[in-house]
C-alpha cells in the first residue's frame, strides 16, 4: 500500500440548507499528482477550502498525514502548501523579495531553500525582476514557489492553469510533474478541463454535484504496456476466431463481421502475420484508442467549457 498523504472521510458541506458536498471518501497518495476534475459548480473549491481549513466542515473529516484538520489544525496544516485564490504578492517587490517576505513568517526557511524552490518552478532568471512585471504564468509559479517554501508533503492548487495560454499551461504542467518527482510532494490540481490535467496527473477523481463519480488511474506513460482493442474484419470468421484463440490468452469477441481482440501494440504485426499464414483474408484492422476524454465525457457531460 502506498501511504496516504491525505484522506477525505465522508466529507460533507451544507450551506444554508443546501448540501454542497455530499460525502467524499478518497485519499491522495504520497507523491502523486491527483487531478480533481469537475464542471463549474461541482464543488471543487468548496472541497479544497475544507481541506485547508478555510471553511468549516459540516460532517466528516480531512486527515493530512494522519492529522485531523478539525481537531489538530496545526499538526495537519503544517504539511500543506496551497494556492486557493490568486497568489498574493507585492507587485513592487522582486520575486525574490516576495519570497523573503513570506519566508519571514515561516520557521526555518533558509536562502538555500528559497533558491531551491525558485529552481523547482523555473524562475531563476526572472527572480530579481519586479513581480508586477511577471506574466500570469510566472505569477502562478511564484505562488507555487511560495507554497513550497516550508517543504509541505502535499500541495493544493485550485485551477492553476486558469487564464493561462497553451504555453503557460505546458510550463505549469512541467513544473508540477517536476516537483512531484523531485520533492515527492503529493499535488492536488483542480480543473474543469480534462485535457489540461490528464497529461500531468497520475490519477483523476471526477466530482459532480458534490459527489465523487469516478476515480481513475491515468495510464499511458511511455513504458506502460497498454492493451489495445483491435477490430479485425476477416474471412472466414470462424477459422480466424479459432486460430486467434490458440494465440491469445484473453477472449476473442465477435461483432457482426468483425472479431475484437485485446493485445499489446507490439503484438499486432505478429497476430496479422499468423492470420495470413493461416490463409485468412484480412479486410480491415482498426485499433481502438479509447481516451480518458471518451471515458469521462458521459460522466461530466458536454458543458465543461464555459
Ligand atoms: N458561500 C456559498 N453560499 C452558497 N452557495 C455556495 C457558496 N459557496 C459555494 N456555493 C455553491 O456550491 C457549489 C459548488 O461551488 P464551488 O465553488 O465549490 O464549485 P467549483 O467546482 O469550484 O466550480 P468552478 O469550476 O466554477 O470553480 C455551487 O453550486 C456554488 O453555487
Ligand atoms: Mg472553483
Image (cartoon, rainbow, N blue to C red):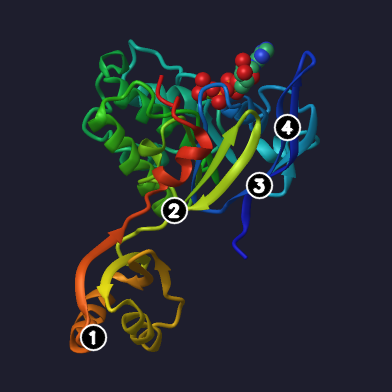
Residue 228 as seen in the image, left or right of residue 101 = left
Q: Which of the labelled discs sits on residue 26, or is there none? A: 3
Residue marked by disc 4: 22
The tag earlier along the polypeptide, 2 or 4, is 4
Q: CA distance from mark 3 to mark 2?
A: 16 Å
Between 61 and 253, which is closer to the camera in this rendering?
253
Q: Nearer the viewer, mark 3 or mark 1?
A: 1
What element does badge 4 sit on?
A: strand
How packed mark 3 is, by other alpha carbons closer than 10 Å (few <14, some 14-19, many 20 or more), is: some
Q: Residue 23: percent from the left, percent from the top? A: 74, 36
Q: Residue 103: percent from the left, percent from the top? A: 48, 29
The tag earlier along the polypeptide, 1 or 4, is 4
Q: CA distance from mark 4 to mark 3?
A: 13 Å
The tag earlier along the polypeptide, 1 or 2, is 2
Between 257 and 214, which is closer to the camera in this rendering?
257
The tag earlier along the polypeptide, 3 or 1, is 3
What element does badge 1 sit on?
A: helix
Q: Are marks 3 and 2 in contact (CB under 8 Å)?
A: no
Q: Could you tell me which residue is drawn at 31 percent across and 18 percent down? A: 131
Above or below, 66 against 245 in this view is above
In this orientation, does residue 109 appear? no
Quadrant where the N terminus is found in the figure: bottom right
Q: Nearer the viewer, mark 4 or mark 3?
A: 4
The tag earlier along the polypeptide, 3 or 2, is 3
Q: Which of the labelled discs sits on residue 274, or is there none? A: 1
Quadrant where the C terminus is found in the figure: top left
On the image, which quarter does residue 117 sit in? top left
Q: CA distance from mark 1 to mark 2?
A: 33 Å
Residue marked by disc 2: 218
Q: Residue 252: percent from the left, percent from the top? A: 42, 75
On the image, which quarter does residue 168 sit in? top left
How packed mark 2 is, by other alpha carbons closer than 10 Å (few <14, some 14-19, many 20 or more), is: some
Amino acid at each position: 500500500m502506498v501511504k496516504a498523504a491525505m484522506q477525505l472521510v465522508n466529507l460533507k458541506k451544507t450551506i444554508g440548507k443546501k448540501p454542497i458536498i455530499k460525502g467524499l471518501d478518497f485519499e491522495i497518495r504520497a507523491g502523486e499528482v491527483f487531478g480533481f476534475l469537475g464542471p463549474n459548480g461541482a464543488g471543487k473549491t468548496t472541497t479544497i477550502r475544507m481541506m485547508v481549513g478555510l471553511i468549516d466542515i459540516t460532517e466528516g473529516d480531512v486527515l493530512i498525514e494522519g492529522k485531523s484538520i478539525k481537531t489538530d489544525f496545526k499538526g495537519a496544516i503544517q504539511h500543506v502548501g496551497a494556492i486557493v485564490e490568486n497568489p498574493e504578492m507585492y507587485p513592487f517587490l522582486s520575486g525574490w523579495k516576495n519570497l523573503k517576505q513570506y519566508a519571514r513568517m515561516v520557521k526555518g526557511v533558509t536562502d538555500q531553500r528559497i533558491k531551491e524552490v525558485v529552481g523547482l518552478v523555473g524562475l531563476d532568471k526572472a527572480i530579481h525582476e519586479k513581480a508586477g512585471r511577471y506574466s500570469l504564468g510566472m505569477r502562478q509559479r511564484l505562488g507555487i514557489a511560495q507554497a513550497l517554501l516550508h517543504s509541505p508533503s502535499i500541495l493544493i492548487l485550485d485551477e492553476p492553469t486558469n487564464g493561462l495560454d497553451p504555453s503557460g499551461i505546458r510550463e505549469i504542467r512541467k513544473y508540477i510533474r517536476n516537483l512531484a518527482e523531485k520533492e515527492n510532494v503529493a499535488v492536488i490540481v483542480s480543473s474543469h478541463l480534462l485535457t489540461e490535467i490528464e497529461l500531468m496527473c497520475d490519477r483523476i477523481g471526477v466530482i459532480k454535484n458534490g459527489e465523487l463519480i469516478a476515480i481513475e488511474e491515468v495510464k499511458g506513460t511511455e513504458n506502460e504496456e497498454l492493451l489495445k482493442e483491435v477490430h479485425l474484419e476477416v474471412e472466414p470468421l470462424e477459422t480466424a476466431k479459432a486460430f486467434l484463440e490458440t494465440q491469445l490468452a484473453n477472449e476473442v469477441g465477435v461483432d457482426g463481421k468483425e472479431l475484437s481482440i485485446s493485445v499489446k501494440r507490439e503484438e499486432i504485426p505478429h497476430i496479422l502475420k499468423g492470420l495470413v499464414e493461416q490463409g485468412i483474408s484480412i479486410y480491415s484492422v482498426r485499433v481502438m484508442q479509447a481516451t480518458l476524454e471518451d471515458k469521462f465525457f458521459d460522466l461530466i457531460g458536454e458543458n465543461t467549457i464555459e
